[in-house]
Image (cartoon, rainbow, N blue to C red):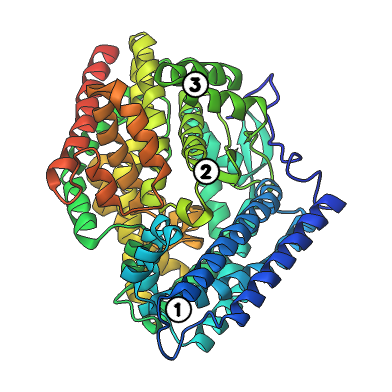
Amino acid sequence: MQETGTKLPKWDVTNVYPGLDTPEFEAGYQSLVKGIGKLEALFEEHAIQRPGNPPEINKDTVQIFEAALEQINVVTTQVHTLRTYIFTFIATDSRNTLAQAKFSAFQNQEVRIAKLFTRFVAWVGSLNLESLLEKSNAARKHAYTLHNAHIQAKHQMSPAEEILAQELNVTGGKAWAKFYNNYASQITNQIQIQGEMKTLPMTAIRNLAFSPDREIRRQAYEAELAAWEESAMPIAAALNSLKGQMLTLSHKRGWDSALDVALFDNHIDRETLEVMMQTAKKSFPHFRRYLKAKARALGVPTLAWYDIFAPVGESRAWTFEEAKSFIITQFGGYSEKLAGLAKRAFDENWIDAEPRDGKRGGAFCAWLQGEESRILSNFQPAYSGMGTLAHELGHAYHNMTRAERTYLQRETPMTLAETASNFCEIIVRDAALEQAELSEQMAILEASLQDACQVIVDITSRFIFESEVFEKRQARELSVEELNTIMLDAQRATYGDGLDETLLHPYMWAVKPHYYSATFYNFPYMFGLLFGLGLYACYQENPESFIEQYDDLLSATGMDNAADLAARFGIDIHTADFWQGSLDLLIENIDRFEKLVEEYTV
């Protein structure tokens, strides 16, 4: 379902460079090349690499460290902006051959900076960190990054092996990830809608899951499965290759498992993960109550997979302009700073909202430069479309709070990257609920629970799936049929009798792009939702003191681990009580939804 009558916006990045084929872009690219060359010369001059003997922390060592740190921050910022700029063209049109060529050439520069950063980590890992922190203000400002570097240094292979791994990654893991994104974005299939046969891109077919017409949803589901089945073999090859590479490198670097790498990257420990996941599983019977209540609202005995995103109630259609106005107004009720960020995003065309062939599915927000981000969505004119915009604008706000940080200070793990996005989505949801009539309340509440069910129940199924894939991939590659079986088993284990087990989605491993760019991408989303709910509860208790403290937390998400950041608000993420408190808020909404269904269906 796509908004009609109004042209949906496309993002504009011409304030960075006028285009990929312009002298300005070439000048920026050459500036990066020279900057990396300057950094390479600095590293060679001062032998910044794994030393035979750890250097003494004297004045000279501190000066070398600070010079290297400053240049790394400058160059990595340039790398990031150029990468995001080029990717904006690919994400919206994977057939853009110029962008693909530019990105391929750019990856060679990424390899150069990756090699240097590996050397920097090895060198820093050999230093007496306590002494360095004592003598260098710059080191103190990057203390968390340096602590992590000491851990990473212990998990490095030999310098020659690390260099080879980075070079091979361009034609290995990164190549498979690029292949997946390009290939999946170009998948189309035919579907008959109201008697007319249409050929639609996968983004548009998947958007039909939000249609109020069950027959259209069923046809879209069948068309989607057929398209994924036809495309499954090369996608399975990509998944096998990526997971195989991750297993090999994890083992060679001395990690106990790929999960341990993910936990380190996400700034949490195994204790936090286990208590969160165990507490979440206890909520599954409540989410099955929600699914059964939705089935009653839709007048079906049991939900099929293609009913998961079906609208419930008599919700109004939210056009893009209406969603824009509502979001800005409600963000203003929180703070003018948040509303101003949203207004700027809309006014300066940071958002690409139109589903189209060649465009990546789903939604994301990418930091571009300074305070600026770019948001990709595939907008559908419903409350869920507005909720997605609010969510991604939350990411943009988070990016803005980190604008004054150095590149290394602002590197945020996925667990904490979801903090502001979920918070902003809750602001919009609560405001929409407060203003809605009975049938629309049910529609809004259901859309919110729909998202929560995805993050709690479906995310767990993806975690189970990925865990088993990693376990089995240690022995050999997995076939399409095996991947399907693992996915279906995971869905049955989590959704239980909330869904018709004969109408599940065996190809979800092919649908989700995160499998092809991250390891265990799933649990950070659950962490983000539940952490965001906990923080929102803190906001409701004391709004005035919360806002400034919250912005400080968002600004520092790359500068501390999740447990210590949470402790600023008196939250202990190692206890089941915190996670249960956030889940209880969702369970209250399930209870409320059940009552609304009873009232509405009488």
Residue 68 visible in image: yes
Say which residue appears at 45% left-offset and 78% top-offset: 122
- Front residue of 489/511: it is 511
- Front residue of 58/274: it is 58
The residue beneath circle 2 is 404
Residue 173 sits above or below residue 184 on the image: below
Mark 1: secondary structure: helix
The residue beneath circle 3 is 327
Say which residue appears at 32% left-offset and 67% top-offset: 259
Say which residue appears at 17% left-offset and 47% top-offset: 279
| Disc nearest the viewer among 3 and 1 | 1
Side of 281 relative to 51 (left or right): left
Callout 3 amino acid: Ile
The first of marks 3 and 2 along the sequence is 3
Mark 2: secondary structure: loop
Q: Are marks 2 and 1 in contact (CB under 8 Å)?
A: no
Quadrant assignment for the C terminus: top left
Residue 91 sits above or below residue 169 on the image: above
Count neighbours of disc 2 (C-alpha within 10 A) and say few if under 14, some if 14 to 19, many if 20 or more.
Answer: few
Side of 129 relative to 184 (left or right): left
- Residue 498: horizontal and vertical position, in percent? 26, 40
Callout 1 amino acid: Ala
